[in-house]
Image (cartoon, rainbow, N blue to C red):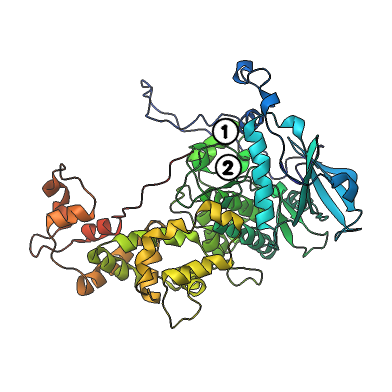
Amino acid sequence: MGIFASKPVPKPNPYARKEAPEYSEPPTPAETPRRRPNPPPSPAKHLMAVLLRRHASMKPNAAEIAEGAEAGLDKSFGLSKKFASRFEVGEEVGRGHFGYTCSAIAKKGDLKSQKLAVKIIPKSKMTTAVAIEDVRREVKILRALTGHRNLARFHEAFEDSDNVYIVMELCEGGELLDRILQRGGKFSEDYARTIIVQILNVVAFCHLQGVIHRDIKPENFLFSSKHEDSEIKAIDFGLSDIIRPDQKLNEIVGSAYYVAPEVLRRSYGTEADVWSIGVIAYILLCGSRPFWARTESGIFRAVLKACPRFDDDPWPSSSSESKDFVRCLLCKDPSRRITAAQALCHPWLRDHEKVQLQLDVHVFRPMRAYMRSSPLRRAALRALSKILTADELFFLEKQFALLCPDANEGITLETIKKALMRSATEVMKESRVLDFLEPLNALGYRKMHREEFCAAALSIHQLEIGDGWEERAQSAYEIFEKDGNRAILIQELASELGLSPSVPIHTVLQEYIRHSDGKLTLPGFIRLLHSLRPCSPAKTP
């Protein structure tokens, strides 16, 4: 459901590997299948069927919707009823599953004589309360986020007895998918970089507000004009949702080729959008999809199991930075995947003139754990921060500068809130980003300077998957030995690691403490780095 959905005329497959076989899992010995607790959904479950059921356009069981239930739905949105008197509707320019888009011209008012786009959503298709709420939320999100240069500008929403009308900027340059088709799928690195930077700009902004798009794909990015260097605009927030920083969603929505593994496992956050951007980046750089099969179930198995290939042409001639960038986005573990704000600081992108650095709410997650940690664990994190590379420090230092514009001052709770409010929209209140800062209340009484921030905000999970982690951990441990290691009791370490008193802690922890002096060993040091005790996550809706 979008401003410009896919055209009615089917398009040829733009970047399929024509001779590639369907992905298949390696054979396993015959054995009695064992049921796992809370298994993930079958990857063959059709995403479109979920969408159709969501809007009651398809009823697997007619008894699911009581006869006459639709009559009791409130389809009044409280929007202006003056659409017909203010706009003249032109030809249809796009059609989705639950609405269509037309060109329009304003007949009066501030927009008089301007060419616009109007998305028309028939109320007859709103046959469930969920479908009605989807439209309300889409209007709310578009109204709140409008103004970002890489987001199709929202002007106003209207309704009458038959339809909801969303009046938007008219982007006349066509879909990103169209340009992929025109170029045979292959873009130069420079042009691909320009597109990806703009996509990340708007997605990082959305994530800061607490908005997850959930349908990132080339069809949902339009060029504002037909010029080669035209800006790109994000559209179609019909599947978007507002999400708290510690919340997980469980509804499978999106498009098969771009869906993240954790979406198929029904537990995901904003990281799922980043995966989808990784798929687009892969396509732009090599002209083929990273996960491909002849059937949808095969695609889903590939997303869950397979790794993208970087040994086929043109990857061998691509820059190492571009390949590393795509790998960081297509990391299957969302806790180790870089965020949209981090991606803008990646060496492949960060010097691009169009980069718009954004605050990253995700840095507050390790900061919250740091503020609850013991002095011993803080010392371990400070030691680890001293072995960070210049590229790893770049993102943290940029975040520090956004939170504390005066480099000579330190971060306080007040400076964090001020930095957030400079970019805040109405939806940030609903996503409760400020509530997420509660464990940082101690910063109301003291300051956190740059070096401590780099220790508090670093991601151990991301460092672990980098090259040479064992050697780097050893180097950090040697610094810790000099500056922070001290004798520690087994009971104290058990408490630090959050182990229950019922566990035979002497057996579990004996390899973590040296018998000679009672100090942490290297395995104990690494285990200590992971002793995160996050707040209880929000319940999955």
Q: Position of residue 187 (x, y in %)?
A: 70, 58
Residue furthest bottom as drawn: 408
Residue 387 appears in the rendering: no
Report whether 376 appears left or right of 388: left
Report whether 378 appears left or right of 267: left
Front residue of this view, candidates 202 and 426: 426
Density class for disc 2 (Cα within 10 Å; few <14, some 14-19, many ≥20) is many
Mark nearer the N terminus (2 vs 1): 2
Mark 2 or mark 1: which is in front? 2
Q: Position of residue 439 (x, y in %)?
A: 37, 59
Front residue of this view, candidates 392 and 492: 492
Residue furthest left as drawn: 516
Which residue is drawn at the image coordinates 18% and 62% (left, top)?
A: 520
Report whether 346 appears left or right of 139: left
Quickly name the residue at label 2: 259
Secondary element under disc 2, as helix, strand or loop, is: loop
Question: Which label belongs to residue 298?
Answer: 1
- Disc 2 and disc 1: Cα gap in Å? 13 Å
- Determine which quarter of the picture holds residue 317: bottom right
Which residue is drawn at the image coordinates 66% and 57% (left, top)?
A: 145
In contact (CB < 8 Å): disc 2 and disc 1? no
Report whether 117 appears left or right of 141: right
Residue 449 vs 468, above or below: the answer is: below
Which amino acid type is marked by label 1?
Answer: Gly
Front residue of this view, candidates 53 and 178: 53
Rendered-image quadrant of the N terminus: top right
Front residue of this view, candidates 523 and 224: 224
